[in-house]
Image: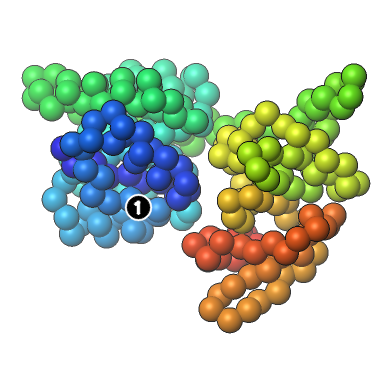
Amino acid sequence: MNVVIIEDEELAALRLEGMIQKIDPTIEVVAKLESVEESVEWLNNNEDPDLIFLDIHLEDGLSFNIFDQVQVNSPIVFTTAFDEYAIKAFRLKSIDYLLKPVTLEELERSLEKYKVWVNPAENKPVDMQTLYQIIKKKEPEYRSRFSIVAGQKIKTIPIEEVAYFHADEGIVCLVTEKKAKYPVDFSLDQLSEQLDPKVFFRINRQFIVKLSAIENIHVYPKSKLQVELQPTPGAEVFVSLDKVTRFKEWLNA
């Protein structure tokens, strides 16, 4: 069984690949693609995979744009952060979905559903245009605040006061513009789904930063970028090389 993963977050793609192979080591992930453009090119030049895991939001647009440019004959499992309303629509259209963050049990269920898809008598056409309209109408709601435990009290931090999120030794902390630092019960992967991508960007494995928290950007040879943050985290912060292009696009959006 050959599988393609279309996901613009490298760590999420690697995690999904690892979970797939844990469930069934005979499954081969033949490609991990990050964008609409890359996906269209691959699908035009390769045989249809047995199954596609498809993220909704890719680095260069909605993944539905793929279907406007190339015929996709493979069954699809969407990975999505959309709410229950949209999820019900996916179910009604006879395709499966995985709500992020993906769990092993949900992934196993999707692979079982694939066995139904390969039966021609059960395989039903998917109305991609209808799903596309659902997605356009039902954008996810992003976090507006965080509840933080501070000593014996619980306080609320509005998203406007957050400067960045920092992961260190397994602990993720929220850092405010006023230099306050609080641990949060979310991974950076989970936070990436909850934060407005127009305002926040995950620059590497340790930081999700807000645009207004970036004070300076230093350019080094070989596309290396160093970011100065306010408040300062106390160590040099660099943009991962695989995110440099998207980071520049985000700055210019």
Q: Residue furthest front?
A: 169
* Amino acid type, residue under disc 1 in the picture: Leu
- Could you say which quadrant of the image residue 239 lies in? bottom right
Give the residue number, with chain letter if any, for mark 1: 33
- Residue 126 seen from this side: no
Task: Give the camera-side residue of 239 and 80.
Answer: 239
Would you call the spot at circle 1 few (<14 residues within 10 Å), some (14-19), or many (20 or more)? Answer: many
Residue sitting nearer the eye, 70 or 28? 28
Left or right of 52 on screen, residue 226: right
The part of the image, by quadrant, that contains residue 124 is top left
Please count the marks in the image. 1
Farthest residue, direction bottom: 221
Residue 113 shows in the view: yes
* Of the pair 15 and 121, the residue shown nearer to us: 15
Taking the spot 10% from the left edge, 23% from the top edge, the residue there is: 119
Q: Residue at x 77, y 31 (%)?
A: 145
Q: Is residue 219 left or right of residue 18?
A: right
Image spot of residue 28 (x, y percent): 21, 43
Residue drawn 8% across the image and 19% down it: 121
Q: How is the image coloured?
A: rainbow
Q: Position of residue 40 (x, y in %)?
A: 29, 55
Quarter of the image for the N terminus: give it: top left
Where in the figure is residue 200, as x and y percent of width and height?
67, 48
Q: Is residue 177 above or below residue 24?
A: below
Q: Residue at x 85, y 54 (%)?
A: 231
* Relative to 7, 24 lies left or right: left
* Label 1 SS: strand
Residue nearest the viewer, comparing 13 with 43: 13
Q: Is residue 87 above or below residue 222?
A: above
Can you give x and y, in whole percent of width and height, for residue 228 in the image?
76, 64
Position of the C terminus by quadrant: bottom right
